[in-house]
Amino acid sequence: MKKYINLFDFSQKVDYKIEILSGLTVALALVPEAIAFALIPGFSPLTGLYAAFILCLVTAILGGRPGMISGATGAVAVIFIGLIVKLKDAFPGITPDEILNYVFATVILAGLFQIGAGVLRLGKFIRLVPHPVMFGFVNGLAIIIFMAQFPNFYQKGGVQLLPTNPFMIMLGLTLLTMLIIWGLPKLTKSIPSSLVAIIVVSALVLGLDIDTLTVADTMKDGESIKGGFPPLSIPQIQFSLETLFIILPYAAIVAGVGLIESLLTLNIIDEITDTRGSGNKECIAQGSANILSGFLSGMGGCAMIGQSLINTSAGARARLSGITAAVMLLVFIMFGSSLIERLPMAALVGLMFMVAIGTFEWASFKTFRKMPTSDVVVMVLVTLITAITHNLAVAVLLGVIISALAYSWENAKRIRARKSIDEDGVKHYEIYGPLFFGSATTFASKFDVQNDPEEIIIDFAESRVADMSAIEALNKITERYHKVGKKVHLKHLSKDCVRLLDNAKAIIDVNVLEDPRYKLPVDKRTIFSN
């Protein structure tokens, strides 16, 4: 049974060494990710780094899942590409600085949507995501993380591989990083193996003056991660309905994608730590972080499964690790930019390779012959859509829809009717399985209106009336019997079914006489007639 974490208790027992060292490791891993995601829509590296700092800090303090890391993400960054195209069409001649103002306004509006979702307690709906969809989401994300590292083995422009010597150096250092991360925990767990790997490989490169790709090489010419504290930036945009209609859809998408990725990450960390966080509290924290990010020159973001796994795998379980990561990231920006820019990318690539390997649900392969075919199809489909399109929201929503349709189809086939005639000549139809939109047609085919006796009883002791389609099915079957002068009784309807039928009187002309005791008596009948 999962333990519920005390979200407001900052006095929990904390292993300060593990939390601080893990936070430092996460901060180092956040730098290249934030830079890479900022460059996707063409923003400055600092736009991504500021977002990573603000989201990491705010969600670490206010979030519903201690130990989970948030920052600038690729899933959110790609949304801004469409927004930029829309802005250029609507405002010809718009400058990059003006575009950024609209981006910040979009992030702020998205944050308001996310807070609204938390206040309305919509975070609980993440429970509707089936396990095959979770498997597919995690596997697709692992593939994305893994594939995103390969451009580092190519020359700038991404067309040709690095020359033989630089390629072999890059590959060797990457494998060394992975070996340390894999092997060190077998010797000691007193210090995060990821941090040791980064330090060892960086010391090797800097000490021996090895010519290999560094963080500075991943940035455009003239750009740097050096900066100050995130500057206050109130978005300067045209306040009009046209502007609202432009940014509103993108704000909604940013909010939706951010919440889906954050709540799924929260669920995954819950499983790893065997505790349960608060989805609604996380929605409010994500929204607050994005609003602050929009006002402090950040591009917005959400939870990051890769960095969250780095953090939890190192043993971090408290808020201190996320706070440390955010503070250290700001220290890197303000004071340590020259050192961070010299870090070898091979160390960070090796770290992310190991994250991808650890993220992938290898056990899902073992379930192929044990799971229903529909679940396997959903898992594979969500994996492929996530990996190919990088659109996590679409992949998850499509997986949920297909799972729901498969469930409905299976339940539609389960409705049955056992038929018998008692000593009074009354025919009984004992219904088994739920009566809902999927089974309404099959339900109607169970009755022999022309050949049935003058009186029939439809017994719902083993069934239930679920929706409007079920009510319509009942109405139609009673109409068919009524036209040939026969009487229909409904028996053993549950209270919620009677209430549903009673509420439908304004829509369908029905008359339900309810047994006031409703103890499922053998001789009491609820009459349903037109």
Image: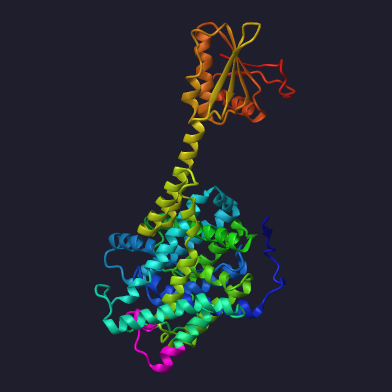
Of residues 346 and 86, the one nearer the viewer is 346
Question: Which quadrant is the C terminus positioned in?
Answer: top right
Task: Give the answer, above or below, for where 386 lies relative to 515.
Answer: below
Q: Is residue 489 left or right of residue 112?
A: right
Q: Is residue 506 above or below residue 402?
A: above
The answer to whether residue 529 is magenta is no
For the N terminus, the image quarter is bottom right
Say left or right for 277 vs 201.
right
24 vs 236: above or below: below
Is residue 118 visible in this depiction of the protein? Answer: yes
Please say whether residue 218 is one of the residues in the magenta stretch: yes
Q: So how many labels did they put on this image?
A: 0
**Residue at screen point 33% across, 81% down:** 168
Q: Give whichever of 450, 84 is nearer the camera.
A: 450
What is the quadrant of residue 31 in the picture?
bottom left
Q: Which residues are magenta?
A: 203-220
Q: Position of residue 406 (x, y in %)?
A: 46, 39
Residue at the outermost left position: 160
Viewer-side residue, 397 vs 292: 397
Residue 401: x and y, percent?
Answer: 45, 44
- Image coordinates of residue 125 in percent, x first then y, are 56, 49
For image coordinates 61% across by 72% down, the residue present is: 316
Residue 353: percent from left, percent from top:
43, 71
Q: Is residue 129 above or below residue 150?
A: above
* Residue 27 in sight: no
For the rendered model, the colour scheme is rainbow
